[in-house]
Image: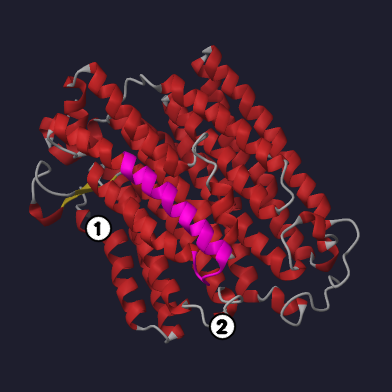
Amino acid sequence: MNDLSWLVPMPVVLPLLGAGVTLAAAGRTRVQRLTSMSVLTAVLVTAGVLLWAADQDGPQVMQVGGWAPTEGIVLVVDRLSALMVIISVICTMGVLRYSIGQGRSSFDEESDGHAPLPIFHPTLLVLSAGVSTTFISGDLFHIYVGFEMLLAASFVLLTLGGTGPRVSAGVTYVFVSLLSSMVFLIALAMTYAATGTVNLALLAERVPDLPQNTQVVIHLLLILGFCIKAAVFPMSGWLPDSYPTAPAPVTAVFAGLLTKVGIYALIRTQTLLFPNGDLNDLLLWAALLTMIVGILGAVAQDDIKRMLSFTLVSHIGYLLFGIALGSQVGLSSAIFYVMHHIIIQTTLFLVTGLIERVGGSTAASKLGGLARVSPLLAVLFFVPAMNLAGIPPFSGFIGKVGLMQAGAADGSWLALLVVAGSVLTSLLTLYAVVRVWGRAFWGATPEGLSGSGPLRGGHAQALGTGLVLPTASLVAVSLGLTVVAGPLFEVTSRAALDLLLRAPYLTAVLGSAGGL
């Protein structure tokens, strides 16, 4: 057996060290860029090694400071954690490379070049550390710490440039995030008061001994806190108004990652703390309503960013569907779909940034003929858009088929109703993206959009290599998920089995005494 537990904290430690270096190097752009890319590359390699170790030898565990699980912080990387860290770092690297390609003027158009751009690199690395903290934490309080790191970094990124709409969106985002944190904190306090611990492995053993009413209250509070974070209906109204105002790379990383930390926390608590599925019917209803309400909002939008934001809400319903089913196929498909959705949403928001640079707007009604102006841009939008809609043979189709098979296997009328809702949502998603495709990329070309100089003095500059390359790379990653879907589904299936058995996680954290 390979003991690689010393690598477990690296996805958190390395970005925090990198944040310190890039903050000290404020004003030295080249040092910041080199440090940020080097740190994220190192984290990606580390996460890959940890996935291999977890797949071969089981969860990798570090008792921070040598303290026992009952007294100190425990960091755990199992198959699920490693997969989430890998896909989150790939997303962050794509966004970082895109922001580098934009250059100094990326976030400060409204501030005449005086926005605090040097803080972008340290803030993005703190965001990455917060995401990783959530994924590898072995206790509820440390997950809460990860959420707060995300909140602080997110507010800074969301308000970069200091414009009125961005500050307003940032205030809304912070208010909702604080509400989520407050609910989570109350659940944490009740959990500790009832069980004497917040360690997930110990909670898995002690929660079943609590009175039924206490279990239900704690369960509901945790679900509520995580669903606000994940933008599950009816707690999703804040998202379409918050994300579109930020710069393209910031919106991209938000859309790709931030809602998924809530989904991850839901997966972990549903399978580890409340495996009996007492509230699964409630989650199925929430999944159905999130799908339908989200996609109806998307269909009604003219602005591409807002349309994508509503599809983001809608597709959170698919992830919730797999969690609520609670079967191995359902969880495996949900994990696969999380990975697919992180990449696709990030890519589409980056492409939308390119559309804005070429067309000067993201309103479909103000665009037209983009396919003639830039066939490359048309391809970069079309491929992930079809993937989002779930057209075969893309990874979106594979993930949705897995979820629908799990729903059909469940066989209950409610699960079958959600399957029907997921089919309808897929069709409406296809309608929404095809409508945008038709308006923005075909039809008459508006005056000034001839390819001779829509923005920044020329079409070639608007779509520079530094912007196209990271976007195309993420499109390639999304296609890669399709190519390796078979082996990847095998890994997610093993991860789902671990979640259902619970024994591998508990034994790794608590020793032989922790096996169920």
The image quarter in which residue 458 lies: bottom right
Q: Nearer the viewer, residue 345 or 11?
A: 345
Residue type at mark 2: give it.
Gly
* 95 relative to 265 in the view: left or right: right
Disc 1 target residue: 9
As for residue 402 lying within the magenta part, the answer is no
Q: Dot 1, how many residues are within 10 Å of its Cα: few (below 14), some (14-19), or many (20+)? A: many
Disc 2 target residue: 113
Residue at left offset 36%, top offset 21%: 277
Residue type at mark 1: give it.
Pro
Q: Is residue 249 above or below residue 412?
A: below
Q: Is residue 53 above or below residue 155?
A: above
Q: Position of residue 292 (x, y in %)?
A: 62, 31
Q: Nearer the viewer, residue 449 or 507?
A: 449
Q: Position of residue 413 (x, y in %)?
A: 55, 12
Quick one: SS at disc 1? loop
Q: Position of residue 328 (x, y in %)?
A: 42, 27
As for residue 174 lying within the magenta part, the answer is yes
Residues rendered magenta in the picture: 159-183
Marks 1 and 2 sit apart, C-alpha to C-alpha, by: 37 Å
Q: Is residue 358 above or below residue 58?
A: below
Please report contact status of discs 1 and 2: CB closer than 8 Å, yes or no.
no
* 155 relative to 276 in the view: left or right: right
The image quarter in which residue 14 lies: bottom left
Q: Which quarter of the image is occupied by the C terminus? A: top left
Residue at left offset 36%, top offset 78%: 22
* 278 relative to 299 in the view: left or right: left
Q: Dot 2, how many residues are within 10 Å of its Cα: few (below 14), some (14-19), or many (20+)? A: some
Q: Is residue 41 visible?
A: no
Quick one: SS at disc 2? loop
